[in-house]
Image (tube, grey):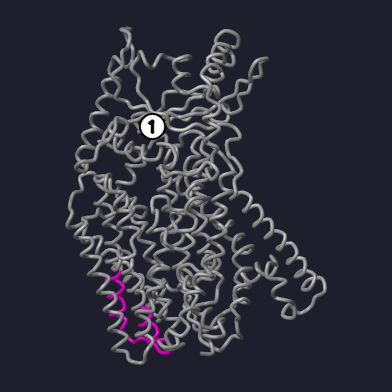
Amino acid sequence: MSRLLIVLLNIFIYKHVSGYLDTYVPNHRHALDMQLYEDVLDPELCEKQLQYMRENNTLLLLEFLDAGIRIPRGIFKGGFVDMGNYFQCLEISNETPDFVVEGKYCTINMPLEQDLELPDIPGLPLRTELGIRLKDLAKEREVLYKRERKEGKQRDLLSSSPVFSLALCLPTPCTTREFLDGFVINTTELGLTYEDNYCRMTNDKPYVAADYVALGVFGTIILLTILSTSYDVRHTVIQKRDPEKSNKLLKSFSIYTNTKRLVVYKPVNGAIECLDGVRALAMAWVIVGHTFVTQMNELNANPSDLLDYILSLPSVWITAGPITVDTFFMLSGFLIVYTCAGKFTGMKLLRNLHFFYLNRLLRMFPTLAAFILIQASLLNRVADGPNWRMVLENTNACRMNWWTTLLHVQNLVNPLQMCLPHTWYLAIDVQLHILSPLVLFWVLGRRKRIAWSALVMALATALIASSIYNTINKFSSGPVIPSRPDDQEDYMIYFYLHTLTRCSPFFVGMIYGYLMHLYRDRKFIMSMFHAVLIWICMGVLAASVLYVSNPIMQLDWDNQPVDTLINCLKRPIWAMAVGWLVFACAQGYGGPINWMLSLRMWKLLSRLSYAMYIVHYPLLFVVNSMTLVPVYFSVQKSIFKFLADFTQSFLVAFLLTVLVDSPCSVLIKHVMGGGPRTARKPAVEDLPSKFGAQEVPVTVFVTEQGKIGKS
């Protein structure tokens, strides 16, 4: 079994070590100067430099060999990767009268299954037990892949046998083949086959338009922040004048005011306090799940142990992690009804529909646009490493497809080259927000029967349509199913990122939002027995949703009807359980759960949750890509790593909110003609965040947009 796990892990590892993006990226936009790699190649100069090192500078030759190729350690733990010494290689620079010998770092993919013409040397490892065992591994992997291969889908040698990913340090004018033939072994005579992966050189990150735009935009923001903060501090702190009499536009970029507004909390009558805890804990679950999952892109010394853990029952809190996104879909539907109902009628909504959409999009835009620019420019320059390919791919994706993310169509257009790939959630949520007036119009009327009919019909339509769609397409039941590796791409594009298959939690949330609206000013009366019974039922349903992620991860899982059933019911059931939690806590049936979720410590995390969601995933790739050597996986280490990832996401989100989101919120309100506040009982606290519970800022929309508030 352990050998089979090693083989399986290599399937997933190879998906992430095969060079850069397949999509075409013009050189003037590419994260690397691809023309530079072509220009430096010179076979004659390569031969001269190799000859120079062989005959005149063996110490330099040893330095190249020392920084380069090695046999990976821990092969039978799945350790097929060795990355040499990246920075040592790039630091090599030896000047001679005729040329300068500089280091170039390259990686190659070498299949284990080789038909080598080896000399008959007694005791040569590949002639003995090790060679036999490695060939057995190759055969096992080929059998495993053939088992799930789709009809008509062919694979090359590298993807049908275990692959070593090895590092080479060579002179810049040389190709890997010239270097190996000239220094190590004659690969042609030996019959050694391999595939070039990628190369890196010093100063290979050119400045492009995105870099200059980022410099101008963030330079302007810093300048405005300095001026605005100086004005605010002088007016409020030095002169001790009334802050209410200061110019709100002049202090819109003030760190002093924006930080104070972010961290100071005022009690709000009628607020659903438990939403802060739900949103903060869901955000933490997203980050811890991504911390574990992104380690499959990291350099692991024991990837078989990682897969062993993923297949085990104790990992269910990680493998079930994707369900937390449906928590946010439910909260979005809940809030859009609860905050609109009772404030205006369906006709008023239609008359102000342009504000309804515009306010939503503008409130999300600043943070999202700022981090797209950061990903397209700054993140590519903050660090480097031999595993930097994921940051490069993300940078290229944002330079090519930034517009799809800003338009919130990235789940439909170029989904495999998505800028900020985790923002697929925002795209679906915006699309559901755009469609929501089709249901809201009827819900906002005075007739409860019509409102309930519209809500039930919307949910039923979503469930029936998605069930038919799932049944026809026979999707797997998760994004990474070891028994169905070939189905991963189809599942992601046509199910996981599809609005139809993800909309049911949103409509469940709308139902709970309307129910909460009906009992806005009075308590929902039920006996303690019934409350406990419902809690138990919802707890069992939620636990079942979590548990089901374990059997589908097993290597022998093969049950398409159950896969279809899981895809159809798992998400609405989870939304129903979370919706009950919110409703019960708000109605006084939450007990200690409501106490915990309503603690003030969640408020800052809740306010920052939208920004944390935007920034955390790219930051994970930056940190993981800085890894220089394979790292040993353990659950304990991963938990400590999560704490570090969570902290850095919190800090970056705090800065982004204070410097970008808060100032832009003031400017947007001013431009859109924000009127005076009207008396109302808010559904939730007016926060600068737009994610989860606050991701539909309709309370701000109703009170701050004068036209709507007065209509």
User: In the displayed structure, does residue 45 sit left or right of residue 420?
Assistant: right
Tell whether 363 sits left or right of 344: right
Which residue is the site of mark 1? 79
Q: Residue furthest bottom?
A: 446
Residue 523 sits inside the magenta stretch: yes
Quadrant of the snapshot with the N terminus: top left
Crowding near the residue tagged with mark 1, few <14, some 14–19, many ≥20 C-alpha atoms within 10 Å = many
Residue depicted at 42% across the width and 14% down the height: 185
Span shown in magenta: 512-538
Q: In terms of image quadrants, where is residue 473?
A: bottom left
User: Image height check: is 424 above or below 14?
Assistant: below
Residue at 72% in and 80% down = 244
Nearer to us in this view, 153 or 342: 153
| Vertical comparison of 340 with 626: above or below | below
**Quarter of the rendering containing residue 166:** top left
Q: Residue at x 23, y 31 (%)?
A: 140
Q: What element carries label 1?
A: loop
Q: At which x and y percent is residue 367?
A: 55, 62
Q: Which amino acid does label 1 sit on?
A: Gly
- The reply, left or right, for residue 533 in relation to residue 615 is left
Q: Which corner quadrant of the image does residue 146 belong to?
A: top left
Q: Does the magenta stretch include residue 6?
A: no
Residue 385 rendering spot, x and y as whole percentages: 53, 37
**Where 499 sits versus 38, above or below?**
below
Q: Where's residue 540, x and y in %?
A: 27, 66
Which secondary structure type mostly characterizes the magenta part of the structure? Answer: helix
Counting from the top left corner in percent of width and height, residue 546 is at: 31, 59
Along the viewing direction, whichever of 274 and 238 lies nearer the viewer: 238
